[in-house]
Amino acid sequence: MRAMKSLDTRQRFLFDETHVRGEVTTLCESFQAIVQRQNYPAVVNAILGEFLAAASLLSATLKFKGIVSIQAIGRGAITSLMAECSNNTQLRGIVRGDYQSINDNESFKSLLGGATLAITIEPEGRERYQGLVPIDKDSLSQCLEHYFAQSEQLSTKIKLAANQTTAAGILIQEMPHNSEDEQTEENWQHLSLLLESLKAEEQLELEHEEQLYRLFHEQQVRLFDPEALQFFCSCSKARTAKMLSSLGIDEVNKIFEEQDSIEITCEFCGQQYQFDQSDTSDIFDESKPSVH
Ligand SMILES: [Zn+2]
């Protein structure tokens, strides 16, 4: 094991002689880059931080290249909240809603209770699939544990924490195995209980290695090298053009009767894309079905 600064990284760990593995992550600059151009209330910032840390952890559990997105679709002050980790290390996220009525004492459940949590996995080049669970628990981690129990049938324990500058997460998961002996079950229960004892401050302040030592110093834990994570928005002029083409040529022409160009701002990163009439005629030419 090497001491490493754990900011904007994720690290895998394994318990020797058990069927349990884990992931631990801390987001700092990437998290700040995602929220800095938005004006979310503090409590919304922190909830988005937990979603981002969770997206980082879940993408590490993929066995293939792809995108994991965790989305809450609500009907309250927050109408939608989404965090995404693509190709394992690129994060982005966004919150939509009306924040006027939100005060600092709101909890996860008061803001998102009754909403639906959608976990979407898009393997590269293959069809995406989605799992849904209701948000009926006190924390995002409990909702995600419910999702794992329901969809993957893998025992999973997650702890998430976030403040205004840092987001952190740790996950342990039972790997598929054939031994159903008592010892295996006891091991899992013991490790879950230990994980439960980790405090939010410790997650946010301690290095990954220190967190693991604090929790599991009696176990044989192997910590792997850190992977770097960063804020990255996958938007482009071409992808934005697709959005425009979905409006239909008539609608787009109507806009050009009133203005010379159409400007679309990416909600995730603030990048502006400008389309004039010649751009859009290209878009609609390309979107014409080819005749065979
Ligand atoms: Zn963007």
Image (cartoon, grey):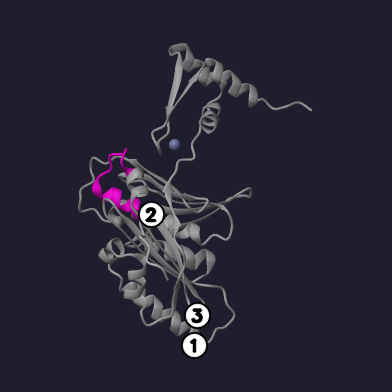
Q: Residue at coordinates 52% horizontally, 77% vertically from top-left?
A: 19
Q: Is residue 154 left or right of residue 109?
A: right
Q: Is residue 228 magenta?
A: no
The quarter of the image holding the N terminus is bottom left
Amino acid under label 3?
A: Thr
Q: Position of residue 194 (x, y in %)?
A: 35, 77
Q: Secondary structure at mark 2?
A: loop
What residue type is disc 1 on? Glu
The answer for how far apart the CA atoms under marks 2 and 1 are is 38 Å
Mark 3 or 1, which is nearer the eye?
Answer: 3
Please name the residue shown 32% across and 62% down the image: 138
Q: Quadrant of residue 172?
A: bottom left
In the displayed orientation, state which residue is furthest to the bottom.
Answer: 182
Give the residue number, with chain letter if any, for mark 3.
18
Q: Was residue 47 drawn as part of the magenta stretch in this picture? A: yes
Between discs 3 and 2, the one toward the N terminus: 2
Q: Quadrant of the C terminus?
A: top right
User: Mark 3 to mark 2: distance in Å?
Assistant: 28 Å
The x, y position of residue 190, in whole percent, is 39, 81
Q: Is the residue marked by circle 3 packed among few (<14), some (14-19), or many (20+) residues within 10 Å?
A: some
The image position of residue 171, as x and y in percent, is: 42, 66
Mark 1 — residue? 182
Magenta stretch in the rendered image: 35-50
Mark closer to the chain start, 3 or 1? 3
Q: Residues within 10 Å of mark 1 (few under 14, many from 20)?
A: few
**So how many labels did they put on this image?**
3
User: Is 44 situated above or below 199?
Assistant: above
Circle 2 sits on which residue?
8
- Asked if disc 3 and disc 2 are in contact, CB closer than 8 Å, the reply is no
**Amino acid under label 2?**
Asp
Give the distance between the C-alpha atoms of the residues marked 3 and 1, in whole angstroms: 12 Å
